[in-house]
Image (cartoon, rainbow, N blue to C red):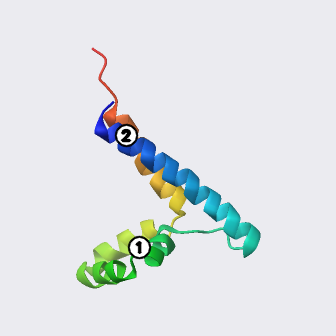
């Protein structure tokens, strides 16, 4: 199994955990939207602020559009792409 495929499976597992956390927050707070921005800010706020200050504002707007999406969706899609790119080619 290729390292890219292993990383894909790890990302899919993380997506499942983010989906479970979103459900948990929906039950507790009524806020079911756990965005990637929220997760990044929770664990590494200094790096998020640094990226926001360092990146060109037009590029930051594109990055921010991805960051406000649900964390499980973004991580899950990246995981599926890694699994697809890491599969063996059939000759």
Q: Position of residue 9 (x, y in %)?
A: 44, 42
Tag 2's secondary structure?
A: helix
Quarter-of-image position of residue 53: bottom left
Quadrant (top left, top right, bottom left, bottom right) of the N terminus:
top left
Q: Position of residue 32 (x, y in %)?
A: 67, 68
Instruction: Reply above or below: 60 against 15.
Output: below
Q: Position of residue 84 (x, y in %)?
A: 38, 35
Callouts 1 and 2 close, C-beta under 8 Å: no
Q: Give the Cα separation between the discs numbered 1 and 2.
A: 27 Å
The dot on residue 6 is 2
Instruction: Reply above or below: 31 against 4.
Output: below
Q: Which is more N-terminal, label 2 or label 1? A: 2
Which residue lies at the image location 29% right of the left edge and 82% below the top edge?
Answer: 50
Tag 1's secondary structure?
A: helix
Quarter-of-image position of residue 44: bottom left
Q: Is residue 66 left or right of residue 53?
A: right
Q: Nearer the viewer, mark 1 or mark 2?
A: 2
Label 1 crowd (10 A; few <14 / some 14-19 / many >=20): some
Instruction: Reply above or below: 10 against 46.
Output: above
Q: Position of residue 89 (x, y in %)?
A: 29, 23
Quadrant (top left, top right, bottom left, bottom right) of the C terminus:
top left
The dot on residue 64 is 1
Q: Is residue 28 left or right of residue 73?
A: right
Q: How many marks?
A: 2
């Amino acid at each position: 199994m290729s390292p890219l495929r292993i990383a894909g499976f790890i990302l899919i597992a993380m997506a499942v955990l983010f989906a479970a956390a979103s459900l948990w927050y929906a039950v507790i707070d009524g806020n079911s939207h756990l965005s990637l921005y929220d997760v990044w800010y929770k664990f590494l706020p200094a790096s998020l602020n640094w990226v926001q200050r360092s990146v060109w504002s037009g590029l930051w707007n594109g990055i921010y559009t991805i960051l406000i999406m649900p964390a499980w969706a973004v991580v899950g899609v990246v995981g599926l792409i890694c699994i697809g790119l890491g599969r063996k080619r059939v000759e």
